[in-house]
Image (tube, grey):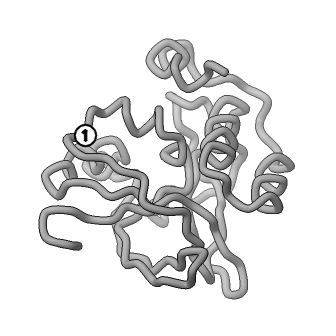
Amino acid sequence: MMGKKFYYFAFGSNLLRQRMELNKYSYLKFSTIAKLNDFKLDFGWNSKTWNGAVATIIPCCGSHVWGVVWTMDVDDINILNEQEGVSSGVYEPFSVDVATPNDEIIQCRSYRLLKEKLESDKPSKSYLDVIIKGALQHNLPRDYVQWLKHRESNGLQASKSAMEKFACLFEN
């Protein structure tokens, strides 16, 4: 935390600027890309909205997850919590230390699926495409983007309501 601002580490659909902008946060600024060491990206809890599993990060010694650090206003934490399903028991916020490409360590807020939601599964094609689009948009390392592109999806599109609500995410 830094006064009225905080850092948020995004690794899933919130990599994509357009996804973050849907919530009309009072302050949202891209800060940097960063790597979370000793965690891995996984998918669990089948979302009806996305029609498949959603991203989470779980401890895994020797692995890492690339993501985006957003600077946000503290007054927007409730909006972010709502988006992440904190009140409905899907995700929980927690603090992580991430490393920038210049080896600066930044303490960030992030989210992980609650343990009972962790059953591993496959994301929908739509959801995975949004993650990949966000990774490309922010120039995450090429090998990480390739790894994302080789993740297996369940082949489904997001729900009809999600495709309408998130139409801007699927535009080229």
Which amino acid type is shown beneath numbered disc 1?
Tyr
Residue placed under numbered mark 1 in the picture: 25
Classify residue 171 as left or right of residue 48: right
Classify residue 22 as left or right of residue 98: left
Residue 51: x %, y % from top left? 61, 30
Q: Is residue 11 above or below residue 96?
A: above
Residue 73: x %, y % from top left? 20, 54
The C terminus lies in which quarter of the figure?
top right
At 20% across and 62% down in the image, what residue appears?
5
Tell me the element at label 1. Answer: loop
Q: Is residue 129 above or below residue 2?
A: above
The N terminus lies in which quarter of the figure?
bottom left
Residue 17: x %, y % from top left? 47, 39
Foreground of the two, 93 or 11: 11
Occupied quadrant, residue 39: bottom right
Occupied quadrant, residue 171: top right
